[in-house]
């Protein structure tokens, strides 16, 4: 396409791509930015059966309606934000098509907003990732209080973040665009003891 | 640091995630144009400042971003209960002499 616009992640200036494979002493934490995913903010009534069935028709999975839960399907990963609000993450560039599908299926009182440019996703993993999480957030990261698949809206280095546990030692952070540079600096600083590898 | 149970997230969370938002259960008058300046000012500006039980509005700012209500003792900081918007407190000071 002519007139194409180059997409830039909020961490564009950090040039993470050129740092892949590089690590500081130890490399106990692995950082990966899942950039350019489509982020759709979805609002609706979780008691409305038509709303729930419409979502299921589009994504093939049930909307996670219990507090702090998530659901992953082939097309999308959906996390609970509030009793009437969810974040739907879809493949890069597919957000507009997904939004059209949602608008075709859903009726009545609902809202879909494309907020892809407003936030980015960091994946943190590695043998020392729990230590980084503990020093960054007041939440209890024990598996009993934070099992795999759970999502928690909390603070990360005092900045708001939605943290999803993907594996015992793997977390996904949804962070605001405006906080991303600060959090990138924080993560580098917080990993000084155990080392950081960009993947 | 207070531990506050968000009635929507259904969990105890750190105070850092929340913002206080003043007195709870303030109802906006349905007929503002019929009120005197004093009545309107009472709605806008006048707040209780009790020593003891108080019903407050809080926001789970970094969590679900929902407002909810809290019954709290302003002397001891003990939180008696938190409850959703639209609900009434189960702990009240009505038995006590004000
Ligand atoms: Zn909450």
Image: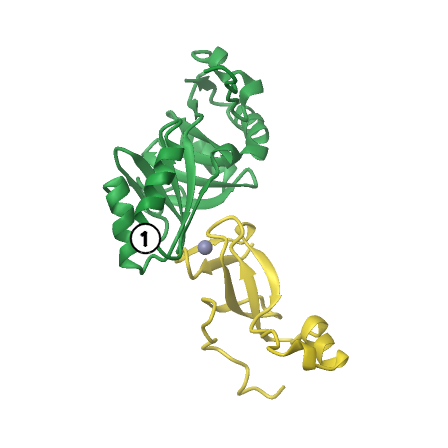
Chain colours: A green, B yellow
Q: How many marks?
A: 1
Which residue occupies 36% across, 34% down? Answer: A97
Q: Decide which of A18, A140 is in the foreground and name it.
A: A18
Q: Can the viewer see residue A161?
A: yes
Residue A47 in the image: above or below residue A171:
below
Query: Residue pushed farthest front?
Result: A2
Q: Is mark 1 within 8 Å of ligand 1?
A: no
Seen in the image, is A133 located left or right of residue A189? left
Residue at numbered disc 1: A65
User: Residue B52: x, y in percent?
Assistant: 60, 75
Seen in the image, is A167 located left or right of residue A85? left
SS for callout 1: loop
Residue A197 in the image: above or below residue B15:
above
Query: Residue pushed farthest right?
Result: B37
Seen in the image, is B14 located left or right of residue A82? right
Which residue occupies 57% across, 41% down? Answer: A158
Give the image quarter of residue A130: top left
User: Residue B75: x, y in percent?
Assistant: 62, 70
User: Residue A25: x, y in percent?
Assistant: 48, 14
Which residue occupies 33% across, 37% down? Answer: A77
User: Residue A46: x, y in percent?
Assistant: 33, 57
Which residue occupies 45% across, 18% down? Answer: A198
Q: Can the viewer see residue A146?
A: no
Which chain letter goes with mark 1? A
């Amino acid at each position: 396409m002519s007139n194409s616009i180059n997409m830039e992640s909020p961490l564009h200036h950090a040039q993470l791509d050129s740092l892949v494979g590089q690590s500081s002493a130890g490399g106990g934490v692995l950082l990966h930015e899942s950039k350019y995913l489509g982020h759709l903010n979805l609002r609706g009534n979780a008691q409305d059966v038509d709303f729930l069935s419409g979502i299921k028709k589009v994504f093939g999975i049930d909307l996670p309606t219990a507090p702090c839960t998530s659901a992953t399907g082939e097309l999308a990963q959906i996390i609970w934000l509030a009793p009437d609000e969810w974040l739907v993450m879809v493949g890069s560039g597919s957000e507009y098509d997904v939004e059209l599908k949602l608008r075709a299926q859903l009726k009545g009182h609902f809202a879909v907003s494309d907020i892809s440019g407003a936030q980015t996703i960091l994946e943190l993993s590695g043998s020392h990732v729990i230590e980084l999480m503990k020093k960054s957030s007041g939440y209890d990261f024990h598996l009993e209080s934070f099992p795999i698949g759970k999502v928690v809206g909390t603070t990360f280095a005092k900045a708001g973040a939605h943290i999803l546990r993907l594996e015992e030692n793997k977390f996904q952070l949804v962070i605001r665009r405006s906080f991303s540079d600060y959090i990138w600096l924080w993560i580098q600083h917080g990993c000084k003891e155990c080392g950081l590898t960009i993947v | 640091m207070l531990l506050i149970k968000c009635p929507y997230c259904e969990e105890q969370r750190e105070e850092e995630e929340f913002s206080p938002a003043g007195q709870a259960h303030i109802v906006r008058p349905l007929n503002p144009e019929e009120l005197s300046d004093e009545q309107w000012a009472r709605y806008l500006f006048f707040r209780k400042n009790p020593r003891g039980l108080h019903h407050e509005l809080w926001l789970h700012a970094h969590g679900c971003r929902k407002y909810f209500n809290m019954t709290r003792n302003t002397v001891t900081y003990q939180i008696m209960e938190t409850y959703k918007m639209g609900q009434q407190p189960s702990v009240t000071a009505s038995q006590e002499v004000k």
